[in-house]
Image (cartoon, rainbow, N blue to C red):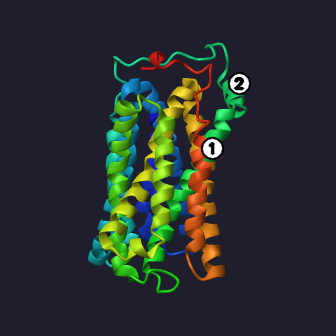
Amino acid sequence: MKAVIVLGLLCVSVPAAAMPWIGVKYPVVFCARLVQGASVGLVLATWAPLIAVWFPPEKKGLVAGLIMGAISLGSAIGVLVSPVVFLAVGSWQKTAALLSIPGWLTLVFTLFLKGRPQDSQVPSLADGASITDGALFRKALFAPITWVGILIAFFTQWCLQSVYNLVPAYLAADVPMGVGFGPMLSGQLSLAIMISGMFAPVLGGLLQDKVFRGDSRLLVIFGFLLTGAFTYLILFSFVHTKMLLLSVCLILAGGGVVLMNPAMAAFVTVAYPIQIVGRMNGLWLGVGAFGGVAGLYAGGRAVAKSGNFTMVFIMVALAAVAGFVCALFMTRPSNSPPADQHP
């Protein structure tokens, strides 16, 4: 895991630090951004195995929530700090180089990080140590829960990208296409979504551990219900004409959609043998990411064709319903390790 994290940090930090020299030609910048994008997948794939090996069952939800909350916090800081740095240095290439500093500091911290705590235990293997990793992975690919999980990740990303990208556009767009708030007020209201993205995962982790007793399925169902209902409500004038009510809906819609990623990461740690937890987590997140692409593409086409955002909200509600139905089948395989066999 440590080697993968180091590689991911190098992929994001090296291109950023080199941008003052390579950031003058579009093809080079394009390739550099592809490398940086790969870093996200590399680092996120380590979530589940790290949680599986380092933390006991009663803390898995909270740890996954803290990780997701930290990602949202880092994204928010980047959005706020980037314009300030740009105004100070007057160059986006220099801005990128300076913003690579946190990545280098994290890399140094990771290099000095020791192995798992001495009191942790490697989870027992559900299928026996004699089965190879490749055989376990092939078996997992044909397990129904794998495709249920991928579909849940797909619909989660559809909702997430729509809420974080298309809803602010709807608030900013002129009437009758949108609400007519303009970019400034829409941006300020979008902070409600961003703030909920920082705290909701931690709250969700606590709910999973303390209220739902480690049942990720209940948290995912709850997340889809919140996202679908409160995103759709934003479409109506009785909501978006009342600033307090609109802010509440934005917070609950944005918070609901980010509850689900840590819940899925925690679920993966108990649904598969430890040898393939990282690969399965990466598979769920990687294939599921196409849901975000599909949501943005379908939403953009719908707006262009109809001249309004109505269909965008309908599609988010339908994606939430589809995810809700899939979550009903989110049950751990009968041959997966019992909870008490995990660290």
Q: Spatial distance from mark 2 to mark 1, Cα to Cα?
A: 20 Å
> What residue sits 71% from the left and 24% below the top?
135
> What residue sits 35% from the left and 56% below the top?
196
> What residue sits 40% from the left and 31% below the top?
60
Q: Which residue is mark 2?
A: 135
Question: Disc 1 marks which amino acid?
Answer: Ile
Tally of marks: 2
Front position in the image: 108 or 200: 200
Q: Is residue 142 left or right of residue 81?
A: right
Front position in the image: 71 or 41: 71
Secondary structure found at label 2: helix
Disc 1 crowd rating (10 Å Cα; few below 14, some 14-19, many 20+) is many
Above or below: residue 230 compared with residue 234: above
Front position in the image: 307 or 23: 307
**Image coordinates for residue 341, horizontal then vertical, percent:** 48, 16
Front position in the image: 175 or 114: 175
Disc 2 crowd rating (10 Å Cα; few below 14, some 14-19, many 20+) is few
Secondary structure found at label 1: helix
Q: Residue furthest bottom?
A: 175
Choose mark 2 or mark 1, whichever is in front: 1
Q: Which residue is mark 1?
A: 150
User: In the rendered structure, which disc, 2 or 1, sits on the residue that comes first in sequence?
Assistant: 2
Question: Disc 2 marks which amino acid?
Answer: Ala
